[in-house]
Image (cartoon, rainbow, N blue to C red):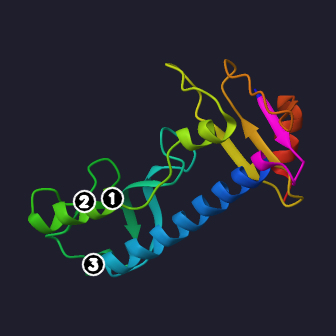
């Protein structure tokens, strides 16, 4: 189901806006931390986009570094399926340490959205999606089985959701 929140004075709006802003900052900080730890910048990554799966922030597996020839081969190895992507080399202590560093980057868990909305976890569910649009409208996608009780969540059609999503 699709929803929007336009009441900026509501608690649910304030909490979801704060959560989403925090998640965006976490992703920016994690990029910086990875670049510092790896010693160079990267263009693309192999992993999971934000708000997919259990994590609401980006999860990384490997990177397409700008200068792969400068990588330490005790830390990085080419991915078998994507030869331009380098991932931590788990057969070495240094590679395992890098993998641990990447695995332990700050993140955000899908259940935080459920807690804010007062929803219970389901056995099978669609990952909740939350985005803040420039006009300060929050749009949400929740599982069809969820029925939020907060009156500030206005149910909308998928067409309206997609139109709002394209704005900005």
Q: Is residue 119 left or right of residue 27?
A: right
| 57 or 112, nearer to the observer | 112
Q: Quadrant of the C terminus?
A: bottom right
Residue that appears at 54% across and 21% down: 122
- Of residue 5 and residue 30, the one placed in the foreground of this image is 5
| Residue 93 on image: x %, y % | 10, 65
Choose the circle earlier in sequence order: 1 or 3: 3
What range is drawn magenta here?
Answer: 2-12
- Percent across and percent down for residue 3 are 81, 35
Q: Residue 103 occupies which quadrant of the picture? A: bottom left
Q: Nearer the viewer, mark 1 or mark 3?
A: 1
Residue at 61% x, 36% y: name it. Answer: 114
Disc nearer the start of the sequence (2/3): 3
Local crowd size for mark 2, using a 10 Å CA cut-off: few (<14), some (14–19), many (≥20)? few
Query: Residues at badges 1 and 2 in contact (C-beta under 8 Å)?
Result: yes
Q: Quadrant of residue 46?
A: bottom left
**Circle 3 sits on which residue?**
69
Distance CA(mark 1)–CA(mark 3): 26 Å
Give the numbered dot on residue 116: none
Side (left or right) of 88 relative to 113: left
Q: The residue tagged with tag 2: helix, strand or loop?
A: helix
Q: What is the number of the mark on residue 104?
A: 1
Q: How far is disc 2 from disc 3 in space, using C-alphas?
A: 23 Å
Q: CA distance from mark 1 to mark 2?
A: 6 Å
Q: Tag 3: Cα neighbours inside 10 Å, few (<14), some, or many (≥20)?
A: few
Residue drawn at the location 32% of the way across and 47% of the way down: 81
Indicate the secondary structure of the residue bearing disc 3.
Answer: helix
Residue 113 picture location, percent across and down? 62, 41
Residue ID for mark 2: 100
């Amino acid at each position: 189901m699709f929803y929007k929140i336009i009441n900026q004075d509501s608690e649910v709006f304030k909490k979801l806006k704060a959560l989403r802003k925090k998640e965006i900052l976490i992703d920016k900080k994690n990029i910086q931390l990875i670049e510092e730890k790896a010693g160079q910048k990267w263009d693309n990554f192999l992993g999971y986009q934000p708000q997919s799966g259990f994590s609401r922030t980006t999860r990384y597996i490997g990177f397409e570094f700008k200068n792969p020839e400068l990588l330490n081969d005790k830390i990085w190895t080419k991915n078998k399926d994507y030869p331009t992507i380098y991932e931590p080399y788990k057969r070495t202590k240094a590679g395992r340490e890098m993998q641990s560093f990447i695995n332990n980057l700050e993140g955000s868990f899908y259940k935080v959205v459920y807690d804010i909305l007062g929803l219970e976890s389901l056995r099978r569910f669609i990952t909740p999606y939350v985005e803040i649009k420039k006009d300060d409208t929050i749009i949400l996608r929740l599982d069809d089985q969820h029925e939020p009780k907060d009156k500030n969540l206005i149910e909308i059609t998928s067409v309206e959701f997609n139109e709002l999503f394209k704005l900005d």
